[in-house]
Image (spheres, grey):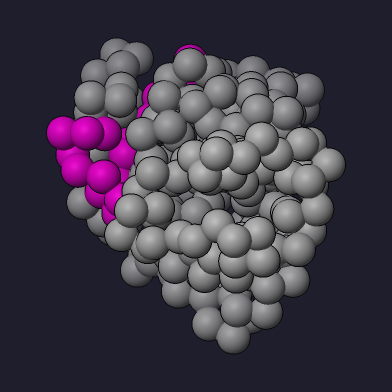
């Protein structure tokens, strides 16, 4: 069985895309940049805040500076936290899966979200003590599909004498960029169809796909481990 688990956060454990959208829209309104939910949500999935702001502003014909992007991230932070504290939707089975995988070995978060957003979500789920380490947006220079976040997670495990866990740790992702990042880091990946279809996730390189977190059970994982490693 897989000796460690790398969880994506947004779209896997917490269903906060609308929370992010509303806060992006509020911040960008001050720059005269409108967002239309049906168009913008799918387009910017997989970006961290910095990547999303750059992409949105460039699509609007602007050339944001690094300093401007940093200011926008900080403007969004309290707006997200206020909304998330009031109501943070989570996915069915998220807490149960985290606890089950943590019982089997180290469980890590690798996310483009800010650290305080991840901490809040884990507290809401009641699983903070089950998570061994968090790799957040503050820890990386590049967002997914760049594998940097997963490589940091691999290094964290390796430095603690868990080389096998580092190289055979299972990634659970919902986005195409996330799947691509996991595979670029050399990790096995299960996609969950919270955001994209089974065909899209498999096309991005997912080794298996589940339609819900409950579907990522011991039977699926045992079969996948045997297929990948014999």
Foreground pick, 81 / 223: 81
Q: Is residue 168 left or right of residue 36?
A: right
Q: How many marks?
A: 0
Q: Quadrant of residue 117?
A: bottom right
Residue 194 vs 21, above or below: the answer is above
Residue 106 vs 123, above or below: the answer is above
**The magenta stretch spans residue 13:** no
Instruction: Please state the horizontal and vertical placement of residue 15, each as a whole percent of the image.
Output: 43, 64
Q: Residue at x 22, y 33 (%)?
A: 200
State which quarter of the image contains the N terminus.
Answer: top left
Foreground pick, 219 / 139: 139
Instruction: Please state the horizontal and vertical placement of residue 7, each as a whole percent of the image.
Output: 51, 44
Question: From this viewpoint, is residue 169 visible?
Answer: no
Query: In the current view of this chain or complex, which residue is farthest to the left?
Result: 199
Instruction: Please state the horizontal and vertical placement of residue 27, each as a whole percent of the image.
Output: 65, 65
Instruction: Please state the horizontal and vertical placement of residue 35, each as a whole percent of the image.
Output: 46, 60
Q: Is residue 224 left or right of residue 134?
A: left
State which quarter of the image contains the C terminus.
Answer: top left
Residue 173 vs 120, above or below: the answer is above
Q: Residue at x 33, y 53 (%)?
A: 39
Q: Is residue 26 left or right of residue 81?
A: left
Q: Quadrant of residue 228?
A: top left
Residue 146 vs 143, above or below: the answer is above
Foreground pick, 101 / 25: 25
Q: Quadrant of residue 116?
A: bottom right
Question: From this viewpoint, is residue 178 visible?
Answer: yes
Q: Is residue 49 left or right of residue 34?
A: right
**The magenta stretch spans residue 199:** yes
Q: Residue at x 26, y 34 (%)?
A: 201
Please report the bounds of the magenta region as a residue range.
186-201
Query: In the current view of this chain or complex, which residue is farthest to the right?
Result: 67
């Amino acid at each position: 069985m897989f000796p460690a688990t790398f969880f994506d956060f947004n779209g896997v454990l917490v269903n906060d895309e609308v929370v992010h959208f509303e806060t992006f829209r509020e911040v960008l309104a001050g720059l005269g940049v409108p967002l239309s939910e049906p168009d913008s949500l799918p387009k910017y999935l997989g970006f961290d805040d910095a990547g999303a702001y750059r992409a949105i502003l460039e699509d609007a014909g602007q050339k944001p500076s690094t300093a401007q992007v940093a200011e926008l991230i900080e403007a969004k932070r309290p707006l997200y936290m206020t909304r998330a504290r009031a109501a943070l939707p989570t996915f069915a089975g998220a807490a149960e899966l985290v606890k089950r995988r943590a019982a089997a070995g180290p469980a890590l978060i690798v996310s483009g979200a800010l650290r305080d957003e991840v901490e809040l979500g884990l507290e809401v789920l009641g699983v903070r003590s089950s998570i061994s380490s968090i790799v957040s947006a503050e820890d990386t220079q590049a967002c997914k599909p760049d594998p940097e976040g997963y490589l940091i997670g691999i290094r964290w495990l390796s430095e603690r004498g868990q080389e096998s866990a580092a190289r055979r740790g299972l990634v659970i992702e919902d986005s195409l960029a996330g799947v691509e990042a996991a595979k670029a880091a050399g990790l096995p990946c299960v996609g969950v169809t919270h955001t994209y279809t089974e065909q899209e996730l498999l096309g991005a390189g997912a080794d298996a796909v589940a339609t819900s977190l409950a579907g990522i059970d011991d039977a699926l994982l045992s079969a996948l481990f045997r297929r990948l490693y014999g």
